[in-house]
Image: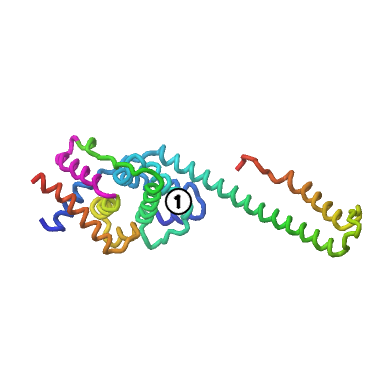
Amino acid sequence: MERWLAGLASAGDLGAFAGLVRAHEPALRSMLRRLAGDAADDIAQDTFIAAWRSAGTWRQDGSYRAWLLRIAWRQFLTYRRKSRPTEPLEHAEDLGAAPCAERKAEVEQALARLGPRERMAALLCFAEGFSHGEAAAIMGVPLGTLKSLAARARRELAQCLEDKQ
Amino acid sequence: MTDAEIDKRLSALLSEQAPIPDPAFVDRVVLAAQLDRRIQVAQQRALRRTLLECGAALAVALTFYLLSQEQPPPPDGSMSLMGPAMAGLVMLGLWAFVSLPNSNYGSASL
């Protein structure tokens, strides 16, 4: 279904593109909110427009979501170069009723304190469930670099877990 | 705790419930994509037109040059109404008369 929509979108079908946006915007915006804070919606919109312009370049053998995330990461870096870095949102306010809300909130706060590269690595590897290889491809870094970023992120976040034990 | 255990716990803590779709955002992106396409079409049209007009201007200049080679200017410096320079000017005027009113320069329509 997704491949079919992407094929139509690459031929200029706006309806098919709308279908792809509808399918991917909730997760993409949610991730960008944790990565880029208030700028998330602007970056998400730029990401979709960039995906629309280069719809023909998506290789059908990969996942469309991973391709979108790769564009989103580049858009985020461009945004950071152009403007002051923004603080990512801390999601503590959403978590009142959850059983481990306090710990979740602390991890979210620790995530927000990470550098952008470590934060992205943590989001891709821990929250989104990508393998190190996939995350490295999305971020456009060598596998070794990604592993270092993920290890650094793990160390920081785990420290926050251990503090509570 | 091993790295694998930490990863597992972090995955559980960082995973989010299914985010809520926002139809207004989808509409906004689709509208932006529509505008983007129209701007691209207009840009391509403007580029094609610019190339055509540059080519036309080059052709006129070349004609001017060839005509001036055909008949050298009179030695006293006067300009003949039937000379090559006048023929070139007439051609230039004709081109401006035909081309410029249809060029839509400054039009905001996309």
Instruction: Kindly identify the residue that appears in the image at 30 percent across and 58 percent down.
Output: A135
Q: Nearer the viewer, residue A162 or A84?
A: A84
Asked if residue A58 lies left or right of residue A31, the reply is: right
User: Is A42 above or below relative to A149?
Assistant: above
Q: How many numbered marks have been drawn onto this rendered protein structure?
A: 1
Asked if residue B76 lies left or right of residue B2, the reply is: right
Image x and y of residue B68, in percent: 84, 61
Image x and y of residue B13, in percent: 19, 46
Secondary structure of the magenta portion, mostly? helix
Q: Quadrant of residue A88?
A: top left
Q: Quadrant of residue A139?
A: bottom left
Instruction: Kindly identify the residue that appears in the image at 36 percent across and 43 percent down.
Output: A84
Image x and y of residue A68, in percent: 38, 53
Q: Secondary structure at mark 1?
A: helix
Residue A103 on the magenta span: yes
Image x and y of residue B17, in percent: 25, 43
Q: Quadrant of the C terminus of chain B?
A: top right
Q: Chain under label 1?
A: A
Instruction: Kindly identify the residue that appears in the image at 88 percent across and 63 percent down.
Output: B71
How would you rate the neighbour count of disc 1 (Cα within 10 Å): few for under 14, some for 14-19, many for 20 or more? some
Q: Which residues are magenta?
A: A96-115
Q: Nearer the viewer, residue A44 or B89?
A: B89
Instruction: Kindly identify the residue that appears in the image at 74 percent across and 43 percent down.
Output: B101
Q: Nearer the viewer, residue A99 or A107?
A: A107
Residue B7 on the magenta span: no
Residue type indicated by callout 1: Ala
Q: Nearer the viewer, residue B102 or B28?
A: B102
Q: Quadrant of the N terminus of chain B?
A: bottom left
Q: Which residue is mark 1?
A: A50
Asked if residue B5 lies left or right of residue B20, the reply is: left
